[in-house]
Amino acid sequence: MKKLLLAAAAILISLSACAQVSDPAAHTLRPDPKIAKHSPYKASKNYGKRIAVFGGSLSVHKESDAAKQIWADLLNAEVVTYGVGGAGFSREQGYTLQRQVDEAGVFDIYVLWASTNDYNGQKECGTWQDYTALDGYDQSKRSTQCGGINYCIKTLLEKNPNAEIYFFTSLRFFNAEAGYNPFSNKPNTTGKTFADYIQGQKDCCAYYGIPVLDQFNLQGVNIFNVSKYYLEDRLHMSEEGYRKIGPVQAAFLANGF
């Protein structure tokens, strides 16, 4: 019964997300010239570039602007977000990242920000081989998280071969033990743990040589301080949480490591 309720909830979330669309014009941030002028990253390779962001609610909720404005100011960058709440990498999960990258223009930097939606939406994790030359770019594999990641990477490289692509792993969530404990053996209905999904994200990026920011392990949030950095749903971060992770993200984006 619990699995059926989870599946039903995932379907409702997915349908709700489908009613939304990317709105980059409403989610564009520009730098404060006074801050950018004194940025410690003025000599970095990505200073002054344009950044496009793809993801679920964690990438686009108003609270996330607290982090993205830090990027904009420190990197003297225009930051444009295509993310949509409920989206995942699987083409079956909401207003999928596959759809978002299809709609995006040409940017200097593309950020793929993984959510919790593929895992909580009970979409198959897949493997790093999904939708690659190794399976002949099997279209059916675009329904897995990994197949979706590989589709996004391939599409963005075709869109702009000179672009930098960076990947942010899923952040922790705290409304279930499996969301924050990397050693949890509690799977979703597909039989995979949240840690399996995060490892799948890293594996896909390793195959393509895409730099990864391991947010799950670098976030610095745990069961003792979660109330300071998360909203009451313990799934989404508060502005304080984004202000905590924002400088880490900016440092990573400055040079890609």
Image: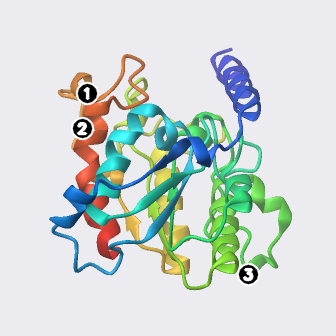
Disc number placed over residue 221 in the picture, else none? 2
Number of other residues with Cα within 10 Å of mark 3, as a class: few under 14, some 14 to 19, many 20 or more: few
Residue occupying image coordinates x 33% and y 28%: 238
Camera-side residue of 124 and 220: 220
Number of other residues with Cα within 10 Å of mark 1, as a class: few under 14, some 14 to 19, many 20 or more: some
Judged by depth in the image, the label closer to the viewer, 3 or 2, is 2
Camera-side residue of 36 and 98: 36
> In what element is the residue under mark 3?
helix
Q: Describe the colour scheme in one phrase.
A: rainbow
- Locate residue 253: give its quadrant: bottom left
| Mark 3 or mark 1: whose residue is earlier in sequence | 3
> In what element is the residue under mark 1?
helix
Q: What is the three-letter code of the residue carrying label 3?
A: Leu
Side (left or right) of 157 relative to 197? right
Camera-side residue of 56 and 74: 74
Residue at the spot of label 3: 134
- Locate residue 233: give its quadrant: top left
Judged by depth in the image, the label closer to the viewer, 3 or 1, is 1
Q: Quadrant of the N terminus?
A: top right
Residue at the spot of label 1: 226
Residue 37, image x, y percentages: 20, 66
